[in-house]
Amino acid sequence: MFKVVRAWVGQFLSLRWLGYVVLAILVFFLFFWRLSGLVPGLAPSEISARATSLGVHTIYHDPINGPLKLIQYAFLKISPTSAVSIRLGSVIVACLFGLCFYRLASSWFGRLIGLFASLIFISLPLFVIAGRTGDGQIMLFSPILLSWLYFWLLKSEKHKSQIWALLLLSAAALVYTPGILWFVAAGMVITRKRVMAAIADIKPWISGLALLAAAGTITPLILSSISQPAIIKRLLLIPTDWQSALTVAKNFGWMLLALFAKSPAHNQLILGRTPLLSVVVLALVIFGVYAMQAAARTKAAGLGLVILLAVTAAAINNNLVYLALGLPAIGLLAAAGLRYLYIEWRNIFPRNPVPKTFALILIAAVTLSQLYFGIRYSLVAWPQSVATRTTYVLK
């Protein structure tokens, strides 16, 4: 009987296409379903983003989130007044970041855990809502793209030249996003030895061309910043008015609480003052921290540094949306928690196939509970709230 069950489950799990179909359906409902009609209209921030994305000239004068604005510009040329035109670029970027998370989590924890962890990550309410909104906030999740390219460069034995060029171009493009410049700078300092070792065999002329292309990518931002110094402050997340050290310290505490307990104030991307993480994700993160500090302390320290940077940026600016910079790192810790629970369960019953199947069922149940929470929060509760329907009313 057990052999029959095991064979059936093995056959079921081997059908990867089924998982991809389910994933595609979830992505459709999370990001594409009623993209223009889930809320009554556009938010003021979306109106502003549309105004600065209508032409190359306007993007040059306000280059913040420039890569996303170029995508929005292409869609706005087709339909200048459609809500879908301003939001579809964010959806595309969200799907790209979700794919990057899957690739990185799979390389660290295996494909199965990577898939479950990716479902949890893309169902985080802030990620879903930012991905369905056209104001550019989804770009704050950019660290996951750079992290994946970096670890791909270290791991790959082939195509290093292409990966290295892609990493340089991506870093140059993503510094148009507020806060990413700090992430790139810290990454250059911390990982320079490993990167130099990884690119030792790449021909110098290839690196030179990649650097030249990256310089060309960032040149418009530099020129625009020279004529408008305020852009530099926005990129570096430097507030217009500095608050006292005591106020920043209080904000820091509030931003930590906003992750798992209670947000300090309402934001248009959250429901009321609810935390950004569910109880399920918080529990997985706790297990993940315990597992990684024992087995992968360097990676755990890197993830912790990213989260600290995000909380600090949110505290200094008193804006919880900048916590999005650290959510990919939190998602990877949750993936480590899933992997830890799976390994521990297997170690108790190493030769019995039934516990393995039961462990997979439990992990699937945990993932489904987070998916249910994320869908209900992002597609039902948030759009129906009074605050949301009051904000998204412009045409």
Image (cartoon, rainbow, N blue to C red):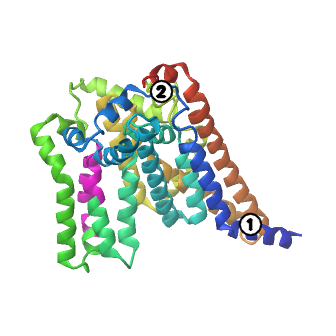
The answer to whether the residues at label 2 and label 1 have Cβ atoms under 8 Å apart is no
Q: Is residue 245 magenta?
A: no
For disc 2, the neighbor class at 10 Å (few under 14, some 14 to 19, many from 20) is: some
- Would you place residue 242 above or below residue 219 in this image? above
35 horizontally vs 375: left or right:
left
Assign a secondary structure to mark 1: helix
Give the magenta range: 170-194
Q: Residue at the location (71% across, 63% down)? A: 348
Q: 320 or 392: nearer the eye?
A: 392
Q: Position of residue 340 (x, y in %)?
A: 59, 58
Q: Of the residues tagged 2 and 1, which is closer to the observer?
A: 2
Q: Which mark is residue 41?
A: 2
- Determine the CA span between mark 2 and mark 1: 43 Å
Q: Residue at the location (24% across, 55% down)? A: 172
> Which residue does the numbered mark 1 point to in the structure image?
12
Q: Residue at the location (36% across, 70% down)? A: 154
Q: 6 or 302: nearer the eye?
A: 6
285 horizontally vs 194: left or right:
right
Residue 17 visible in image: yes
* Residue 134, quarter of the rendered image: top left
Which quadrant would the C terminus be assigned to in this image? top left
Q: Which mark is residue 137?
A: none
Question: What secondary structure characterizes most of the magenta part?
Answer: helix
